[in-house]
Image (spheres, grey):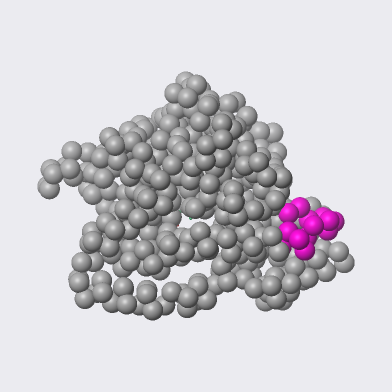
């Protein structure tokens, strides 16, 4: 699905020498590389505070702890996403409230959010799924009206831009009250182990979170709040510093691959290509342009509408083509998250998507020949 080796070859000398420098410095934890990476990511995102941590799941949990959410508070998130989002809500004894998504963008449906709001609702967690921003105009408006926090799960969206209806643009992860991301190796900005970060423009929240990630300490050995231990290490930070200047190029390469895929699959029966919603970006819907940067294609995900998705996955595997089904089971149907409040009729889109979606190889090193082989194999099978 991803070619981490090919990407490493491009930055090998820089990565190798900076990793060796960290080892020689022995500043493995909280060293200068972590601080420099933090500053560089703040500048790239245009966000006031980046707080590095150990992984993207911790980042979500710490964001919720920093906001002071309490047991029983309801947190609304998407039914169609990776389990980390709902997991941390449940772990903190908050109440997850899963809602349906939009069929075109796969992102949380603002109308479904509105219906799910109760007096106990405290926060909304939009996930910028597969690299495309959720409808942040609507989500921020809903949050404002009901006095809710917005926590952006930007693990799949780093580097993408959101254009508001009023014409202003901003990077995803700098829109809500707080955001989380992951530097898991296969993410658009991945390290060579685990890593994550929290972003916010709120000075007080940033201060609180800096204590939460460090055992609740604001002064050494004074534990003011219950915290966690969650750190990005210096070796990962130095690798991320080597990769961050390339992030826009990496995302351009992903978009180029997506354009090639789309071209091959256009007008093929039983295949729906991923929709670029182009939230207010002014380009034609479904144009994958590099200027508006509104989709960074963490995944390239088709819908197979003839009921043969699983057979296609098997066929691709038989032909040596990796593929993935993200995600095969709605979160509301997962044993750990069953809840009487859910009604199947409230999840028509997710229930359909889990049967239809298939993600094809997507990374920065895909060449035309590979894409031609993959698309031919898919089309021959679907059309047979
Ligand atoms: C990867 C991912 C996470 C979790 O990140 P980890 O670093 O693996 O903990 C959370 N949310 C989404 C949407 C993700 O894709």
Q: Is residue 216 magenta?
A: no
- Residue 320 point in image, percent of width and height: 67, 76
User: For the image shown, how many numbered marks are present on the structure?
Assistant: 0
Q: What residue lies at 64% left-to-right and 53% top-to-bottom? A: 289
Q: Is residue 239 above or below residue 73?
A: below
Indicate the quadrant where residue 115 lies.
top right
Q: Is residue 314 above or below residue 303?
A: below
Q: Is residue 267 magenta?
A: yes
Q: What residue lies at 36% left-to-right and 49% top-to-bottom? A: 42
Q: What residue lies at 74% left-to-right and 72% top-to-bottom? A: 372
Q: Is residue 314 left or right of residue 179?
A: right
Q: In the image shown, does 321 or 363 lie closer to the viewer?
A: 363
- Residue 153 point in image, percent of width and height: 47, 45
Q: Quadrant location of the C terminus? A: bottom right
- Which residue in the rendered view is the most extreme toward the right? 384
- Residue 186 point in image, percent of width and height: 50, 64
Q: In the image shown, does 168 or 135 lie closer to the viewer?
A: 168
- Residue 5 point in image, percent of width and height: 50, 76
Indicate the quadrant where residue 151 lies.
top left
* Residue 351 seen from this side: no
Indicate the quadrant where residue 217 lies.
top left
Q: In the image shown, does 134 or 86 lie closer to the viewer?
A: 134
Magenta region, residue range: 261-273
Q: What residue lies at 18% left-to-right and 38% top-to-bottom? A: 224
Q: In the image shown, does 226 or 244 lie closer to the viewer?
A: 244
């Amino acid at each position: 699905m991803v070619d981490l080796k090919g990407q490493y070859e491009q930055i090998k000398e820089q990565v190798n020498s900076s990793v060796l420098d960290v080892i020689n410095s022995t500043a493995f934890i909280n060293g200068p590389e972590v601080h420099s990476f933090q500053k560089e990511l703040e500048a790239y995102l245009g966000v006031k505070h980046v707080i590095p941590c150990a992984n993207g799941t911790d980042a979500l949990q710490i964001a919720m702890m920093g906001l002071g959410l309490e047991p029983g508070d309801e947190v609304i998130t998407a039914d169609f996403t990776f389990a980390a989002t709902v997991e941390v809500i449940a772990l903190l004894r908050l109440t997850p409230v899963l809602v349906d998504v939009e069929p075109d963008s796969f992102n949380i449906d603002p109308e479904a959010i509105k219906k799910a709001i109760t007096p106990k609702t405290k926060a909304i967690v939009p996930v910028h799924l597969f690299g495309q921003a959720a409808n942040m105009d609507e989500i921020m408006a809903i949050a404002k009206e009901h006095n809710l926090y917005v926590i952006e799960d930007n693990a799949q969206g780093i580097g993408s831009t959101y254009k508001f209806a009023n014409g202003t643009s901003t990077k995803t992860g700098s829109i809500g009250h707080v955001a989380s991301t992951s530097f898991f190796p296969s993410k658009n900005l991945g390290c060579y182990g685990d890593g994550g970060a929290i972003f916010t423009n709120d000075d007080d929240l940033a201060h609180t979170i800096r204590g939460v990630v460090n055992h609740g300490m604001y002064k050494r050995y004074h534990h003011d709040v219950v915290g966690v231990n969650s750190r990005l290490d210096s070796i990962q930070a130095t690798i991320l510093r080597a990769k961050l200047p390339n992030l826009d190029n990496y995302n351009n390469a992903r978009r180029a691959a997506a354009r090639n895929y789309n071209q091959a699959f256009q007008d093929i029966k039983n295949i729906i290509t991923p929709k670029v919603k182009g939230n207010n970006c002014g380009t034609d819907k479904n144009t994958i342009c590099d200027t508006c940067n509104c989709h960074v294609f963490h995944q390239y995900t088709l819908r197979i509408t003839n009921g043969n998705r699983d057979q296609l996955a098997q066929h691709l595997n038989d032909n040596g083509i990796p593929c993935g089904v993200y995600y095969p089971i709605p979160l509301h149907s997962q044993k750990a998250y069953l809840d009487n409040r859910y009604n199947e009729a409230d999840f028509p889109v997710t229930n359909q998507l889990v049967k239809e979606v298939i993600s094809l190889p997507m990374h920065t090193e895909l060449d035309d020949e590979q894409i031609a082989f993959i698309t031919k194999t898919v089309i021959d099978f679907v059309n047979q």
